[in-house]
Image: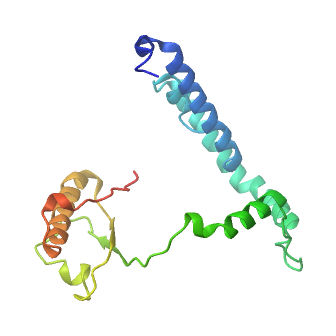
Amino acid sequence: MLTTRPDWLSAEAPWTAHRNLFASNGDALSRIYAGTGALNTSFTRSGKQTFAGLVSNATKSAARMYAAQVTDKSKQIAIDGLLGHLSGQAPVTVFDPVHERLNEALSARMSEYSSYSHVTCFVGTWNLNGRAPGAESLLPWLFPDPTLEPDIMVIGFQELVELTANNVVRLALSSLLLTVAAAHDRPREAVSLHDDTRR
């Protein structure tokens, strides 16, 4: 779009419409699971944090707290009753003919679009306890069985101190990259990590 219409780069209307559409979609989804519109939509729409936006966030947060403490329980009981999840009820099976036919067709032709292979995974979590990692080797932890080499390694980090997070993460990732690269006899650049940290 931008390559064919470079004049749209300076046009405010398309970007404003996109921001409003994005915020409205967020509001609709938020009402489904939280009972109120999404937080910070004023910032999404305008790109600015205003006092009115802060008041709106506080109002929505209060409404969510009230709903969680007062109204959600009765709604959940009604949903459980309809689905047969209450004590003494038989579970209700929801039949969707379109979904069933689609599943049958996909299952019958699974060999056309699916294949199977055995993959070994190593999943671990490293609690840094708010300190930078020491000089101890991680090889006994990362490779407890020298005869097995996992295809995928997933490492989670815990307790990164907020004020020193950059230093701790930098040292931890550097140590981990060097260890994994050395164990596989590969250069450090050949080892990639996926950062899924959420703040």
Total numbered labels:
0
The percent position of residue 189, horizontal first and vertical second, equals 16, 57
Q: Nearer the viewer, residue 170 or 101?
A: 101
Q: Is residue 185 left or right of residue 64?
A: left
Kindly identify the residue that appears in the image at 37 percent across and 55 percent down. Answer: 197
Kindly identify the residue that appears in the image at 10 percent across and 73 percent down. Answer: 135
Q: Nearer the viewer, residue 101 or 65?
A: 101
The percent position of residue 23, horizontal first and vertical second, equals 58, 32
Q: What scheme was used to colour the molecule?
A: rainbow
Q: Is residue 112 left or right of residue 196?
A: right
**Is 194 rendered above or below residue 26?**
below
Q: Is residue 187 left or right of residue 116?
A: left
**Is 124 rendered above or below residue 52?**
below
Kindly identify the residue that appears in the image at 20 percent across and 63 percent down. Answer: 172
* Picture quadrant where residue 105 is located: bottom right
Kindly identify the residue that appears in the image at 50 percent across and 21 percent down. Answer: 15
Q: Residue furthest front?
A: 112
The percent position of residue 29, horizontal first and vertical second, equals 65, 43
Q: Nearer the viewer, residue 2 or 126?
A: 2
Q: Is residue 198 left or right of residue 159?
A: right
**Is 180 rendered above or below residue 98?**
below
**Is 196 rendered above or below residue 85?**
above
* Picture quadrant where residue 179 is located: bottom left
